[in-house]
Image (cartoon, grey):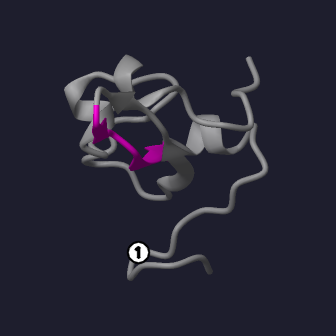
Amino acid sequence: MTPPAEPPPAASLTYVQYSGWACCWCAKSLLDVVGAVSAGRARGREGVHVLDVEVYACPDCAGRSSRRPMNPRGGTP
């Protein structure tokens, strides 16, 4: 299964996905994973509140997308 180019809407994410602790596509925990990838910004609104947040993908989902792995110290390698 190839993940879409854009992350899912912010309102459809679970708490751990929204918090960056789990993959935004498969919900796999990222707490003990090396090679998590920024998947972009999940966008959304609830009334006047903007819910946009940076979300992350596990290496399995990232391997099927065009995103590059994050450097453990931040940024892309």
In front of the other: 77 or 3:
3
Q: Residue 8: which quarter of the image?
A: top right
**Residue segment shown in magenta:** 48-57
Task: Judge from the rendering whether residue 11 lies leftward or rightward of residue 66; answer left or right.
Answer: left
- At label 1, counting other C-alpha atoms closer than 10 Å, the crowd grade (few under 14, some 14-19, many 20 or more) is few
Looking at the image, residue 23 lies above or below residue 20: above
- Residue 55 vs residue 14: left or right? right
Residue at point 40%, 45% (across, down): 52
Identified by mark 1, the residue type is Pro
Q: Quickly name the residue at label 1.
A: 72
Q: Residue 30 location, x and y as percent?
A: 33, 44
Which is nearer the eye, 67 or 43?
43
> Measured from the top left, where is residue 59 in percent x and y?
56, 45
Looking at the image, how many numbered discs can be counted on the residues? Answer: 1
Q: Quadrant of the C terminus?
A: bottom right
Above-or-below relation of 12 to 5? above
Q: Position of residue 6 (x, y in %)?
A: 66, 37
58 relative position to 27: left or right: right
On whether residue 56 falls in the magenta region, the answer is yes
Q: Secondary structure at mark 1?
A: loop
Q: Is residue 68 magenta?
A: no
Magenta highlight: main SS: strand
Q: Residue drawn 70% across and 44% down?
A: 63
Q: Position of residue 13 (x, y in %)?
A: 36, 24
Above or below: residue 2 compared with residue 42: above
* Residue at position x 52%, y 68% in the image: 70
